[in-house]
Amino acid sequence: MTQRSESPVFSRSMGDCLFCKIIDKKIPAKVVHEDDQVIAFRDINPQAPTHVLVVPKRHVATLNDVTAADHAMVGHMVTTAAAVARSEGHAEAGWRAVWNVNAAAGQTVFHIHLHVLGGRALGWPPG
Ligand code: AMP
Ligand code: ZN
């Protein structure tokens, strides 16, 4: 294992992390997609008719911690988000991908996740 993957920010699983517990099936979730790299499940407090979180299986705390070594993982998150939006029927009408980073943006779970929101008109600028 490399030094990078042993650091707390990048470790494979964090014992006190909510999304690591969902990945490890210690907490239930309404999973809509899962593969070797990501899991996608419905947000427990949906902000739109479709509100799905696309979460990498490797623990990374915030988008600030992503590096060039994560391009494949992040790319897979983005294509998974688009596939979820399409399967939920929002590809043509429109949908939104949101990445909250740290306190000012309202990040509450410090394991990166891409929000997929669709099924209603979404205002701009966001709140
Ligand atoms: P953020 O504010 O960007 O960190 O987003 C965290 C999201 O996780 C929020 O939209 C929460 O509603 C959602 N969330 C928190 N706990 C759970 C859970 N147990 N299952 C599904 N979604 C959750
Ligand atoms: Zn985690």
Image (tube, rainbow, N blue to C red):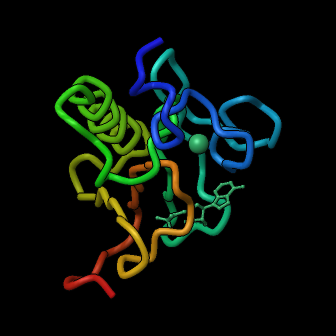
**Nearer-the-camera pick, 10 or 109:** 10
Q: Which residue: 31% across, 52% down?
A: 63
The structure residue drawn at horizontal position 58% and vertical position 67%, both measured from the top left corner, is 46
The answer to whether 5 appears left or right of 42 in the picture is: left
Q: Is residue 6 above or below residue 19?
A: above
Q: In this rendered view, identify the residue nearer to me: 45 or 68.
A: 68
Q: How many marks?
A: 0
Residue 123 versus residue 12 in the image, above or below: below
Residue 25 in picture, x, y percent from top left: 77, 31
Residue reaching furthest to the front: 3
* Residue at 28% in and 82% down: 126
- For the C terminus, the quadrant is bottom left
Lateral position of residue 80 relative to residue 30, left or right? left
Q: Where residue 31 sits in the image (x, y, percent)?
A: 64, 36
Q: Position of residue 104 (x, y in %)?
A: 36, 82
Quarter of the figure with residue 32: top right
Q: Residue at image x 28%, y 42%?
A: 66
Q: Is residue 98 above or below residue 66?
A: below
The x and y percentages for residue 30 are 69, 43
Q: Is 61 displayed left or right of 66 in the figure?
A: right
Q: Is residue 70 above or below residue 45?
A: above
Among all residues in the image, which is located at the extreme left? Answer: 68
Residue lying at the far top in this picture: please name it.
1
Where is residue 5, by image quadrant?
A: top left
Splitting the image into four quadrants, where does ligand 1 fall? bottom right
